[in-house]
Amino acid sequence: MRHIISVLLENESGALSRVAGLFSARGYNIESLTVAPTDDPSLSRMTIVTSGSDEIVEQITKQLNKLIDVIKLLDMTAYPHIEREMALVKVRVPEAAEREEVKRLADIFRGRIIDVAHDSYVIEITGEGSKLDAFLVALDAFTVLEVVRSGVMGIARGDVALQI
Amino acid sequence: MSESASSATAITGAEIFCRSLQAEGVEVVFGYPGGAVLHIYDALYRQDKVSHVLVRHEQGAVHAAEGYAKSSYKPGVALVTSGPGATNAITGIADAYMDSVPLVVFTGQVPTSMIGNDAFQEVDTVGITRPCVKHNFLVKDVKDLATTIKKAFYVATTGRPGPVVVDIPKDVTADTCVFEYPESIHMRSYNPTTKGHTGQIRKAVDLILSAKQPMIYTGGGVILGRGSEALTEFTRQLGYPITNTLMGLGGYPASDKQFLGMLGMHGTYEANMAMHHADVLIAIGARFDDRVTGNIEKFCPHAKIVHVDVDPSSISKNVKVDVPIVGEVEPVLRELIKGLNEAGSKPDAEALATWWKQIAEWQAQDCLKYDQTSGLIKPQYVVQKFWELTEGDAYVTSDVGQHQMWAAQFYRFDKPNRWINSGGLGTMGVGLPFAMGVQFAHPEATVGCITGEASIQMCIQELSTCFQYQLPLKILNLNNRYLGMVRQWQEFFYQGRYAMSYMDALPDFVKLAEAYGHVGIQITQPGDVEGAIKEALAQKDRLVFMDFITDQSENVYPMIPAGAGQNEMILV
Ligand SMILES: Cc1cc2nc3c(=O)[nH]c(=O)nc-3n(C[C@H](O)[C@H](O)[C@H](O)COP(=O)(O)OP(=O)(O)OC[C@H]3O[C@@H](n4cnc5c(N)ncnc54)[C@H](O)[C@@H]3O)c2cc1C
Ligand SMILES: Cc1ncc(C[n+]2csc(CCOP(=O)(O)OP(=O)(O)O)c2C)c(N)n1
Ligand SMILES: [Mg+2]
């Protein structure tokens, strides 16, 4: 089963490689991993999307907790939560008709055009991964030059909070 | 008073290193110098509180530090230079990681300004060691040095112990700052659990008392956590049978009648059969290693399991357990004893009597028997004689192979910390440096090293260290002219195709020992075994290398073949 785990860890050089190394050394899956410092600059917050049986995911959380740099974690799969991912998509739009159609699609998916060049657009779109997938499918008829996806971020709904 | 009051002046990183070790109470460092650590060596030279032992290879330094730690409850400390010094230390670090040995290993590093430039003798030590340390640090600023050393000792020795590497660039050892050693340390990200959860303890007590065919299975955690006294009390109070893992030997007195011997791949028939038929299994400070469980599908098919371990990730990793208790062995055992005393019921005496009767039948199999009439020296006999002649009171190290298993089976350890070997990584070459570390921790004790002709050659250079420091070790080389453990597998599972397992062109070990300044004896007749050991023990201040030419076809029994269940042993 797919799990989304948020981790608070010391914002130290090497902390990321400890987590990445753990997953590769123990053969755990990583679907995506995002990390950045939080409002407290001594802390980083990481979101890991992984999959595995209950036993494996239990080991993953235990092994993560065992890393000295990890302060706290939350397997958000157990709670109502929100997931978001962002993508930046560069599409070739040399013809007026194409520019119009792509703009229309971006609007439908609540994307924004954030760069306009001679014959290409860059579109910013956020949402759950499945929405981004659907948007890319919708762009099938066009020439997509580049796609950058951020990986998933997550936060629990309501009172549940991952903080120290 | 406090260290800082007496030293408000700035001192170098190298001096801070020495002062920090002094503050930690470190008595001895095992190491080897080189460019990146020259400032540190100079500072060590100019003080006299921390002594330094010069090994002959960095692997030996780390293993010696392990031997010191495993036999003494004190962390072991090693010091090596950057690049090749650090890479030579890796095997020891990985060994300590697998067996949870508290170590602090200091590695020199190229100056901070050169890190990442492929500088002379640069390796990414933090990167290379990351998967085999409990934690590691790169110290980039002399101001962080003392606190980092404090953290390193704290992390290495608390919770589930393990090796911590501190990588120190050369410029950091030359830079100066005021020395202040923190008295205590708090790390928000590291808080090991000590006490067990009360509710879980209650559940465990109920389950333990409900048993009809109970079994206690304990491991290295009892040794590491100083739990053997509490374990003995707990086990005697219940009257239940007990077995130890290879790492747990000595955690419960081997000569006690409730002790069924070691379990696992080369464990006794009675221990493995009792595991297989148990209805309640009480696992304490053991990690359900595959050498113990055999085929997981067939492991303890009837048992409900209580598991006490300080590391939550050891629990339900290989085998799902019913009552997990996260905590330190000692306090948890005390709580369990209290729970037993307060409980309304007692163990079921009738069921227990039937269970012991069954166990006695398994014991009657006499699974460790070997041919006593042979004209060849039986390796088991050598170990048994060494046990008798040292009255079971020596510190014993071993290397890896058949001789290790015979040492475990035939030297009956009644006390913890007496048996020092490599279980998790199974590192050939540890025996001699382990023994050096043990002798430094216990200068007056008899320290034996039971080894094989192949293993001993992997760190043989340390005989020179032994001479320099006059370590009167007793080395028992069970010389079967084979990588015996490999040969045994080839005999059983590869139809006797002995690929690369014959040890040809062996050195003359007697001359070799003598070349290093020691006493060497070769023993070829069973009748000479006892005399040789007596003679070696009588040489109180000399290292004696006993080269026993043993029966090369002897195998270790019982054996659970790979993939088999615990009740499916190959017997003699
Ligand atoms: C050739 C060879 C053959 C082998 N054959 C066998 C065999 O037949 N039988 C056998 O048993 N082994 C055998 N081994 C060893 C085996 O590989 C494992 O190393 C061993 O079984 C592990 O022992 P353990 O479970 O006691 O765990 P250890 O590695 O000693 O781990 C200790 C456990 O206790 C926990 N712990 C540590 N401190 C505390 C504390 N204070 N409180 C609570 N918990 C704590 C740790 O978290 C860990 O889970 C063999 C090894 C070799 C090289
Ligand atoms: C460093 C290392 N290399 C290889 C092995 C694999 N191995 C395990 S036991 C063994 C043979 C050991 O031979 P010896 O020391 O003579 O002991 P014996 O089994 O003959 O008693 C080997 C090669 C190992 N455990 N460690
Ligand atoms: Mg051999």
Image: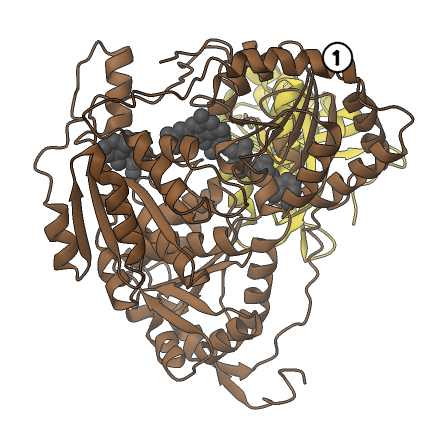
Q: Quadrant of residue B184?
A: bottom right
Label 1: which residue? Answer: B351
Which x, y percent locates residue B164? 50, 54
Which x, y percent locates residue B456? 24, 44
Mark 1: which amino acid?
A: Ala
Query: Chain A appears what colour?
Result: yellow
Q: Is mark 1 within 8 Å of ligand 1?
A: no
Q: In screen coordinates, is B417 left or right of A111?
A: left
Q: Quadrant of residue B329?
A: top right
Q: Residue at x 63, y 12 (%)?
A: B357
The quadrant of the image that shows the N terminus of chain B is bottom right
Name the chain under label 1.
B
- Give me the chain that's brown: B
Reply above or below: B36 against B459. below
Q: Nearer the viewer, residue B193 or B465?
A: B465
Can residue B120 be seen in this snapshot?
no
Reply above or below: B255 against B560. below
Q: Nearer the viewer, residue B115 or B520?
A: B520
Q: Quadrant of residue B472?
A: bottom left
Which x, y percent locates residue B561? 39, 14
Q: Residue at x 71, y 27 (%)?
A: B239
Q: In screen coordinates, is B395 left or right of A148?
A: left
Query: Circle 1 — which element?
Result: helix
Can residue B374 be seen in this snapshot?
yes
Q: Nearer the viewer, residue B343 or A147?
A: B343
Q: Residue at x 50, y 85 (%)?
A: B11
- The residue sitting at the left extreme is B505
Which x, y percent locates residue B57? 27, 57
Q: Residue at x 75, y 33 (%)?
A: B237
